[in-house]
Image: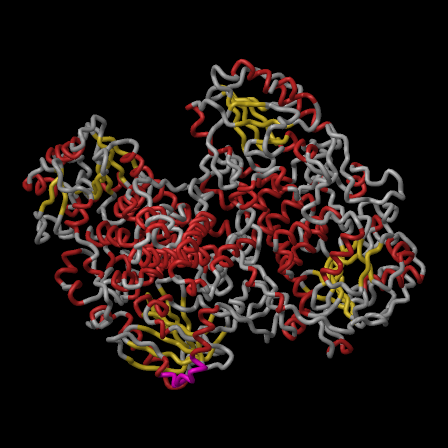
Amino acid sequence: MEPEKCGGGVGARVSTSPPRRRSQTWGSLDQSLSRGLGCWSPGVVSLAVTWPRDASQETPLSSEYDFVLVNIGRLEAVSGLSRVQLLRPGSPLKFTPEEILIHGRDFRLLRVAFEAGGLEPQAFQVTMAIVRARAQSSQAQQYAGISLSKAGQSSGPRKPPIPLLETSEDWETERKKQGAGSWRVSPVNERFDVATSLPRYFWVPKRTLDSEVRRAFGHFHQGRGPRLSWHHPGGSDLLRCGGFYTASDPNKEDIRAVESMLQAGHSDVVLVDTVDELPSLTDVQLAHLKLRALCLPDSSAAEEKWLSALEGTRWLDYVRSCLRKASDISVLVTSRVRSVVLQERGDRDFNGLLSSLVQLLSAPEARTLLGFQSLVQREWVAAGHPFLTRLGVTGASEEAPVFLLFLDCVWQLLQQFPAEFEFSEFFLLALHDSARVPDTLTFLRDTPWERGKQSGQFNSYTQIYTAGYSQLPAGNSVNPQLSVWDWDLRYSSEQILQFHNPGYDPEHCPDSWLPRQQPNFMVSGPPSSVWLFSRGALTPLNQLCPWRDSPSLLAVSSRWLPRPAISSESLADQEWGLPSHWGACPLPPGLLLPGYLGPQIRLWRRCYLRGRPEVQKGLSAPTISGLQDELSHLQELLRKWTPRISPEDHSEKRDPNTIVSQSR
Amino acid sequence: MCETQAFFPGTGICKELEDHALLLWLTQEGAESLNRSFHVLEYCRVSSMASAPTSKYNSHSLENESIKRTSRDGVNRDLSEAVPRLPGETRITDKEVIYICPFNGPIKGRVYITNYRLYLRSLETDSALILDVPLGVISRIEKMGGATSRGENSYGLDITCKDMRNLRFALKQEGHSRRDMFEILTRYAFPLAHSLPIFAFLNEEKFNVDGWTVYNPVEEYRRQGLPNHHWRITFINKCYELCDTYPALLVVPYRASDDDLRRVATFRSRNRIPVLSWIHPENKTVIVRCSQPLVGMSGKRNKDDEKYLDVIRETNRQISKLTIYDARPNVNAVANKATGGGYESDDAYHNAELFFLDIHNIHVMRESLKKVKDIVYPNVEESHWLSSLESTHWLEHIKLVLTGAIQVADKVSSGKSSVLVHCSDGWDRTAQLTSLAMLMLDSFYRSIEGFEILVQKEWISFGHKFASRIGHGDKNHADADRSPIFLQFIDCVWQMSKQFPTAFEFNERFLITILDHLYSCRFGTFLYNCESAREKQKVTERTISLWSLINSNKDKFKNPFYTKEINRVLYPVASMRHLELWVNYYIRWNPRIKQQPNPVEQRYVELLALRDEYIQRLEELQLASSAKLSDPSTSPSGPSQMMPHVHTHF
């Protein structure tokens, strides 16, 4: 509780807790503390800067008032009505503040008041301590993270809530679940010597040897060759890979390996130019900064110009283009059996975004709580999305919250299809806020390799990872077993209950819609058609790879150029271009096709406008749980009464229990 | 349930969907039997992907059922029989036309015209499009193209509707084929110009509830605790002699005599004197409404008016000044002096404080809504949607109205000061402000019947000029008196219901139904400009009230999340950041924008039904057991102990 402890090390957190004595002055400020989880905790604010964490707390992290130092976007000291000082490291505080405003990069705003007679005497000290701690935290390149005392105390290994995909077993289980029969788990990257940004295991075509994988991957940017992302039950495969490494000089066998991996046994291959029509990383970052500035409580944007200012951030535009592209790709994947390859130079940003969105649109499984977490773990965490860099924790210039853009896209889907998702807006909010919380390694590393290094998984190359490995020294290091998915460490059970969408109707999407797997679609020969999907249209390609001397199958000319889209005679009879294609193939009914007209892409108010003072009360409709409790109570009573009156009445046509439990 | 697949339109990918949107809500409420196949093939085309659709999806189970029913029962497909008709509705004509649907392209169909509606059924096998449009919503009928004009479907009729859509029909060019249709439509859509009765007077529907009994002013004032020591009910306007646009029954300060009232009337525009709208049950502050004082250029004063306002101030023994909210922008109020109007000056009214609320006049609102229509029908923007929306200023006007109402409510509730509200004539902005403030202050008005009473009282009885603002049966579409003031009020109510999802007993459908019948002319509720005119036409005897329709089928209009709260004042957030365009109303004709029904709401309704069933069964069981309760030891506890517990949650 002593302020000076605050400077004690990187990863220190500022937290405030409800006061014992409430000061009248702050009544109106209560609202700004809401993190929007529907529970309204009035009571601000005596400051307690704690580090390390008070172990007696029920959840080790993330109370309503927790604020991670890295999350601090701007610090202001306020005294009286007019004295405001922006606090920067090295600049001395010019007065004793009555209040400090902590603007979060996650759109939260924390107002910390120094009550007269309370913490007032220490106000100066505390404020400077926060400034110092923050400065230190931003200097640190890598977070050590925070130890979770609760988890540390618990005896025995803790089973991850979802497979973390650090073992080949996890990959194998997931492969089987997807029914990807013609794929296998390749351990070729077990020592991270193919690519440090790739996971240790991934899926490759069954017939491709590891030596071929190694050979092929060398010709892709940063060694990120084509891997399976998702096997559609109808037979299509969604692949992702980095850009072709054009400077390399592959021999014929290399090219054959590359081509067969892209083809993945399909006769129809579509290469998707991922970044085409999507914003650049710089665009995303700029839009996010503008959005954040606009949503600040003291934003200078005039009220009557709010709508155009919001449009001016372009954030919603970028959300729209991601959704549009993802829905196009879902149609490509579901309308016909083929190999669809997402190709992005780095393969670590928009490939993950598109691949995840495509799965959300096409696979009901991905819309469950477990499925979605697995999806993020697989397509973002394991796939090596550089979280640390993109979220700006390292201070590097390549900050771009692609992951937050993704979460916004998911929120839009939630709005448009409220019965299709098992998780709720509150879950997305929690995930949004977790992105900057240094409790676990999930979002704290750029690559699986770094993550593994930290957790000590490979002291020697031969050591086999065991699930029981959790005997880390307690203290200032992260428990590798813990992931962001261990929600119960940071959220109360009431909050976790709110992660469930009460409107979710699992029957809405029965599995029966899935088209039957086509038995023998694997072809041994070259692909009969190769397309490039770009600018919303398919263009036939001569060959898959860009290199000269390609022994390519369709190679008529040796140049790697899309053929003009105007039909040539030879192609006239073939189906090509999206229109006739899609018209001919009915889309499976489990597919969600989002709308992206102006009014359909909306601002995620509960997230972005949290920091504003006028946050509404009563906004959330009553949860169903209250009514469910009453129903359970009634059932209880009924059960007590029923047998003595008419036992035969008990066999109801619909069992009330299932109705109640379903909606839980 | 399993068939109910969620498909969201607007993907640029061909598909078919059911065009719920093209259907009028009317059909659904009237008789369920009207609810037939509403299936429309929707071919969305996006430039880069022209498409030839063949795929087919199911949509809502409800309508699917009705489709199945029709075919399974082998219902007579004779088209003329399939046209829904209300009792009293008579068929006039029918004709083959091409409906130029802005979303689906031209669709061949047969149009049936009755004295109440225009009904179109598609004749194409792959489309089950149905249009069901009450003639009352038609604002303008134009001929497009001439006998010699070329191009496909260039000759026909273009119909502008009051409910945010246009209808275009193409006809054969030979033999002036559209002349008939044009004349018949004109005749029945604009009956006033042809000395024909409005359909409401011909409607012979029967409902088991009489909506005309919903509002009884004496009862409503009694509910408010009136009359009391300071306020009395006066019948001075019994024959509408004091003020012909006010109701017969008025509540005025006890200390003001009828003669005082007559003298005050001379100083208020159209004699609309300050009268009570609402009184706070605890602090006894009041909301009083009136029109502007007739100050004029010379700055006239009227001692009686000044005294009258002071009497109002003193009714709750408040020491502070009486607060006057002039709804207009300051400049407009000043400008009104030129035509004899004006506002209460500080010099004349020492004990009053005046604030302007900056709400613009009916002409500004009309133009703003026109711009909204431009951006929502038929095409909706993508990238520039927000700035287009901003340029209509519609939400800004909504914001100002709400802000004004919040100020009124806050002044009365926490400022403990009585409030006088006026604009120019006191029947547009004033009605918006008083009724919204009352909705914020008094939870009674948030129930279905309470809201009906509120509309009946503040709008209908106090002379909001519905006939002029809507133009019922009138062909003069460019009339400067028309303005969407009531729509704007309903929009504000919708904004509030969005921000307080548990506070209102009614749902969105209730609001949309009210708006639909604002134009439909099926009911007498919104006909005529004021009570005296309505009385003269014997509206309550000769027509049916909209509330009959609603109250005889209340379940449809109930918000399942409603939790009754007494004495909670609602202050909505009137910020552009939190106001939204009411997509389900303004853009409901666009099949690409169709909001999925809230599944939580459906689940909640199911659970509520289950709860009622449980309670009923429990009651039966307890009753049965207490009847044969000779052996008390078998019962876990007495029913009397049980029941209160069961009901506590709600």
Where in the figure is residue A450, as x and y percent of width and height? Answer: 79, 39
- Which quarter shows the N terminus of chain A? top right
Residue at the image position 68 percent from the left and 60 percent from the top: A535
Where in the figure is residue B538, as x and y percent of width and height? Answer: 14, 64
Residue at the image position 36 percent from the left and 48 percent from the top: B637
Residue at the image position 25 percent from the left and 31 percent from the top: B353
Is residue A388 found left or right of A458 in the rendered image?
A: left
> Which residue is most to the top?
A121
Magenta segment range? B70-80
Residue A398 can be seen, yes or no: no
Is residue A498 found left or right of B261 in the rendered image?
A: right
Residue A503 drawn above or below residue A94: below
Residue A2 can be seen, yes or no: yes
> Which residue is most to the left?
B259
Query: Which picture quadrant has residue A331?
Result: bottom right
Where in the figure is residue A597, as x and y percent of width and height? Answer: 54, 57
Q: Residue B448 versus residue A489: which sits nearer the camera?
A: A489
